[in-house]
Amino acid sequence: MADADDVRRLALALPDVVEIDSDGFDFRVHNRGFVWSYPQREPGKPRVIRTDVAVLYVGDEAEKQALVLGEPELFFTVPSYDGLPLVMLRLPKVTSARLQELIGDAWQMRSDSTG
């Protein structure tokens, strides 16, 4: 079981990471986001920052679909993220070891990417 403090600890342990001021958490490497708290939006309601759900950069749509379909208890997506290489992770359902792997992978892809 993980939480926002675990995300913060793991993200800040990586090189060149900056935390952006937000109502939840928002981490970037080389000015590219790799993990942040989920800004839930429902029509007609104010945006709610969900610190129990992390948005992770996953690189491409194939990886996103593999995670969502393979582990629906951990991962989900929403229509507003269609076509984007981002997936939502339910923090209370993930182990610390898996969270470390996922954050590390997201960091690696964003620190290596160009543009």
Image (cartoon, rainbow, N blue to C red):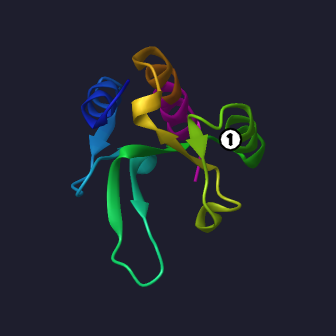
Residue 30 in sight here: no
Q: Is residue 94 above or below residue 29?
A: above
Question: Where residue 22 sits in the image (x, y, percent)?
Answer: 24, 57
Asked whether 63 falls inside the magenta stretch, the response is no
The answer to which image quadrant residue 41 occupies is: bottom left
Dot 1: element: helix
Question: Where residue 85 sits in the image (x, y, percent)?
Answer: 64, 50
Give the position of the N terminus as an image quadrant: top left
Task: Give the residue at x 42% y 45%.
Answer: 53
For label 1, count other residues whose C-alpha is less than 10 Å away and answer few (under 14), some (14-19) or many (20+): some
Mark 1 highlights which residue? 68
Count of labels in the image: 1
Task: Give the residue at x 59% y 68%.
Answer: 80
Magenta span: 103-115
Which amino acid, mark 1?
Answer: Val
Question: Where residue 81 sits in the image (x, y, percent)?
Answer: 61, 61
Residue that extends furthest to the top in the rendered view of this protein = 97
- Which of 66 and 12 lies nearest the eye of the viewer? 66
Task: Give the residue at x 28% y 30%.
Answer: 12
- Which of 91 and 29 lies nearest the eye of the viewer? 91
Secondary structure that dominates the magenta span: helix
